[in-house]
Amino acid sequence: TTGTIATIATLAAHEGETVTLRGWLYNLRASGKLLFPIFRDGTGTIQGIVPKAAVSEELFETLKNLTLESSVKVTGKVRADSRAPSGFELDVQGLEVVQRVADETPFPISLKEHGVDFLMEHRHLWVRTPRQSAILRVRATIMRAAAEYFDNNGFTRTDPPILTPNACEGTSELFEMDYFGDDKAYLTQSGQLYIEATALALGKVYSFGPTFRAEKSKTRRHLTEFWMVEPEMAFAELEDILQLAENYLSYIVAEVLKKHQADLKVIGRDVSKLETIKAPFPRISYDEAHAMLADAFAKGLIENEHKDGDDFGSPDETYISNQFDRPVMVHRYPAAFKAFYMQPDPQDPTKALCVDVLAPEGYGEIIGGSQRVDSYDLLKSRIEEHGLPLDAFQWYLDLRKYGSVPHGGFGMGIERVVAWICGLDHVRETIPFARTLNRIYP
Ligand code: 4AD
Ligand code: MG
């Protein structure tokens, strides 16, 4: 018995028809003369109903003894059922087993709870579970929307190199490699310096690719390899960057809400928390954020006192972001602990014209950006003050010699955004194969 080849996500178009689904046995329940297999096919899951009397003896016995994650082609009639998660059930009529998982080597990820280490060790199999698959589908949409917004708004994608001679975000987190002889080479931390060059060629540009940080810290937000999308605009000031960031994030959240209601349900996300994410976003300066923390400390609402002039710790960011129902844009941090390339605020040169966008619900920084130093002399002295090798930055300094203009942009970490939008505890679930402080396998 075979029917029209279909996928679970498109069953609405096949109600009442006989279809053949190609997938895997996700779960199996037996109740006397009834079997309730659940099949998955990468687009969703569906429960089958198999009364002993309705099928051949052979089919019933094969299915009854089938092992989890065996691959199958299953044929059946699509019946609408409002109680079913997918909205449909399948009255099974035929089954072809493609590969039966051996009884001696059952699928390691059973339906009971597993520890995180075990799951990460089996990540190549863990990705099959409905929740992990749903997260990866949402991630794909976030990545698509992240590029689409720029493609639709006059930005040209220009891909920076991954092997670079210069540090962008500080030298303590560089992955160094030995290949170019006397020239030091590193895996890129950010494409920013290169897209500053292409922005001066093309006006509005973006890059989108993997970036690397030899993070020494083991936190729920840090990966050693992550995907960053970075826009850069010529003739742009901090205000333009703030507006771009709020419109950009609003677009991405709206795309996920439009396309992934079912996946967000599988993940268990409270979507009401996402429906409020619309521009404009609140904006506060570093000084205002510090005052907010000082006040909260005085009232005993937070445990740690924030010292004026220090960066915000993760609990500080959580407190600040909890005061708002959408991402908050914190601008004008002290230049002292920010990157060498940030333009000083003319009103107060101890502050940088920069922004960190903090996601609600304690997710912290998802975007970091700034206006860039546009003066040759200032940039040169910044490079020297930071103890960076001038040689490697000659080309970057050239950009301030040949038609320098106010310009800037930001970087957004895809995994941080996936964690926030999906409401996940840890970034390790936001990328197919996470690379963290102590994990390189699988
Ligand atoms: O704030 P960061 O370090 O900024 C830059 O790299 C700038 N050059 C970007 C620019 O202006 N073009 O990193 C940008 C974003 C962070 O806000 C965060 O979302 C993400 O990249 N990020 C990480 N994500 C996961 N794991 C890590 N170790 C990350 N480090 C940064
Ligand atoms: Mg940052």
Image (cartoon, rainbow, N blue to C red):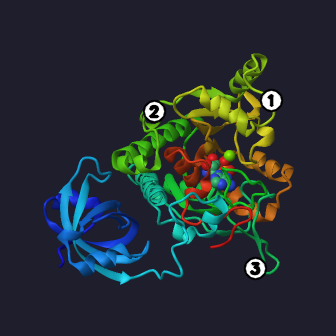
Calculate the distance from the C-alpha at mark 3 to the C-alpha at mark 1: 47 Å
State which mark lies toward you, 3 or 1.
Answer: 1
Question: Could you say where residue 81 lies in the image, as x and y percent from the top left?
Answer: 22, 51
Which residue is at the far top? 299
Secondary structure found at label 2: loop
Give coordinates of residue 138: x percent, y percent: 44, 54
Report which residue position mark 1 lands on: 304
Q: Which residue is mark 2?
A: 279
Point 74% across, 54% down: residue:
218
Amino acid marked by disc 1: Asn
Residue 99 can be seen in this image: yes
Residue 232 coordinates in the image, percent (x, y): 55, 50
Image quarter hosting the N terminus: bottom left
Q: Quadrant of residue 95?
A: bottom left
* Callout 3–callout 1 Cβ contact below 8 Å: no
Label 3 sits on what residue type?
Phe
Q: Is residue 233 at all visible to an observer of this figure?
A: no
